[in-house]
Image (tube, rainbow, N blue to C red):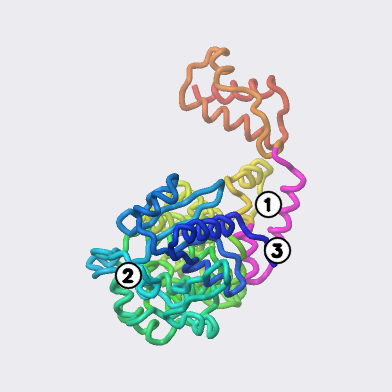
């Protein structure tokens, strides 16, 4: 039996506290689903008949995160649990939130307003009893994602639910039920009304929570891919030279990489997804199929795409760097020492290396460059990649030189010589810098 996590321990304590006041209280949603599937839940949620004012009294230190919806956040150490009052909901006129909610005393009404049957199960953590008002256990057994009630209405209420259906099916390796699938196809364009931030967050989950390949295939099958990621849809049918890519077109190549990708950061997953996004624009036939400059074109396209989806500046820069630099691995064995060292010290270089490994696995499978880089990283160490500077700009000022653009050129020349092993002392560095400055004057 697995040891209780801090979140589970807190959730049980909250249930006991609520029941000590005569309230109904159950674990609800994804944590129940995952426990029944023998997956360790990441988060715990509780549904109760206690009103928001009662919750505030029972848990005076709790944070009111959704007063209108009766949701409080109870924290203890690093653990936190959302506690929500049972509710039913009015119409959704904005495709995201109900116009009004009504707090309820019965769990059945709360279950019926949720998105998918497998997410509407409730559990008594003390007795283990499962409350199932929507046949969610049957859908768990058949590994099915099914909208509760009329699927079209569920997606009209919150358009993001279409992407959530894809995420759950991909992560859990479930099938989307036929009527639910058809409703998504019919209403796919609703996704264009969802805020970029919400789409972004759901796409990241699809790419990083497991089943990324299946997630992309489902997005495509349901008509969502062309709407949220048209640049990725454009990869389909783009031929590649068979001597380097026997697997097929660019789309197939990316899907294979996603299939082989294990646990990944969001930036690595985005780098994998977008590393060849410049190929459709640079495709040409010469002596063979070529994609000249596709890495630079792709980096610019990736940055624009990710900015459109409101990714952070750091995430955009890292993902674009992965795209821009992924072709450099073919040249590593011929690079000058200084060029190689600067390449190896790119921020989060482990992601560049992993993207290259996946790139090789999904094509001809050659790993010479990967093995070479791994060996050089082991041999060089951090000090060799980033040696302590031998001189500074102040040293040049003290030598009588006025600060200006030439300073950067001189300092770069010194660093290059140091990385090449051509100089080792402050005196040698100063002499080189002065020669460069004198030539610039």
Q: Secondary structure at mark 1?
A: helix
Which residue is labeled 3 in the image? 367
Of tags 1 and 2, which is closer to the observer? 2
Give the quadrant of residue 93: bottom left
* Residue 353 as seen in the image, left or right of residue 155: right
Q: Residues within 10 Å of mark 1 (few under 14, many from 20)?
A: few
* Residue 323 as seen in the image, left or right of residue 328: left
Which residue is labeled 2 in the image? 159
Q: Residues within 10 Å of mark 2 (few under 14, many from 20)?
A: many
Of tags 1 and 3, which is closer to the observer? 3
Which of 43 and 311 lies nearest the eye of the viewer? 43
Q: CA distance from mark 1 to mark 2?
A: 51 Å
* Residue 369 as seen in the image, left or right of residue 236: right
Residue at 32% across, 70% down? 159
Which residue is labeled 1 in the image? 334
Q: Is 177 drawn above or below residue 199 in the view shown?
A: below
Q: Is 429 drawn above or below residue 61 in the view shown?
A: above
Q: CA distance from mark 3 to mark 2?
A: 44 Å
Of tags 3 and 2, which is closer to the observer? 2
Q: Secondary structure at mark 2?
A: loop
Closer to the chain start, of discs 1 and 3, is 1
Looking at the rendering, the stretch of residues picked out in magenta corresponds to 354-382
Give the quadrant of residue 339: top right
């Amino acid at each position: 039996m697995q040891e209780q996590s801090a979140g589970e321990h807190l959730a049980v304590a909250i249930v006991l506290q609520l029941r000590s006041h005569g309230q109904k209280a159950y674990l609800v949603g994804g944590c129940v689903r995952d426990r029944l599937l023998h997956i360790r839940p990441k988060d715990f949620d509780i549904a109760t008949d206690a009103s928001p004012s009662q919750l505030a009294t029972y848990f005076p230190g709790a944070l009111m995160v959704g007063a209108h919806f009766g949701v409080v956040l109870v924290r203890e150490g690093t653990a936190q649990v959302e506690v929500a009052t049972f509710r039913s909901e009015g119409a959704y006129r904005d495709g995201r939130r109900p116009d009004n909610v009504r707090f309820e005393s019965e769990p059945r009404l709360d279950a019926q307003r949720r998105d998918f049957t497998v997410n509407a199960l409730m559990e008594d953590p003390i007795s283990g009893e499962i409350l199932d008002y929507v046949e969610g256990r049957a859908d768990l057994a058949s590994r099915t994602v099914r909208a509760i009630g009329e699927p079209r209405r569920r997606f009209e209420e919150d358009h993001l639910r279409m992407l959530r259906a894809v995420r759950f099916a991909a992560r859990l390796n479930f099938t989307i039920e036929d009527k639910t699938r058809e409703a998504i196809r019919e209403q796919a364009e609703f996704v264009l009304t969802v805020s970029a931030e919400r789409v972004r967050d759901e796409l990241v989950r699809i790419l990083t929570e497991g089943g990324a390949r299946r997630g992309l295939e489902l997005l495509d099958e349901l008509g969502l891919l062309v709407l949220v990621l048209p640049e990725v849809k454009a990869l389909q049918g783009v031929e590649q030279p068979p001597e380097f890519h026997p697997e097929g077109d660019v789309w197939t190549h990316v899907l294979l990489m996603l299939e082989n990708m294990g646990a990944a950061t969001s930036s690595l997953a985005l780098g994998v997804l977008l590393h060849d996004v410049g190929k459709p624009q640079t495709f040409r036939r010469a002596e063979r199929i070529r994609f000249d400059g596709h890495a630079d074109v792709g980096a610019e396209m990736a940055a624009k795409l990710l900015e459109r989806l409101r990714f952070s500046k750091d995430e955009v820069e890292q993902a674009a760097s992965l795209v821009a630099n992924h072709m450099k691995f073919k040249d590593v064995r011929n690079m000058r020492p200084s060029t190689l060292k600067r390449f190896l010290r790119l921020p989060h270089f482990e992601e560049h290396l992993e993207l290259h490994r996946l790139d090789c696995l999904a094509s001809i499978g050659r790993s010479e460059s990967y093995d070479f880089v791994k060996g050089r990283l082991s041999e060089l160490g951090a000090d060799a990649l980033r040696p302590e500077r031998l001189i500074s700009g102040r040293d040049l000022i003290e030598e009588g030189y006025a600060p200006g653009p030439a300073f950067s050129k001189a300092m770069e020349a010194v660093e290059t010589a140091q990385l090449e092993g051509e100089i080792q002392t402050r005196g040698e560095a100063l002499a080189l810098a002065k020669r460069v400055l004198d030539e610039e004057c």
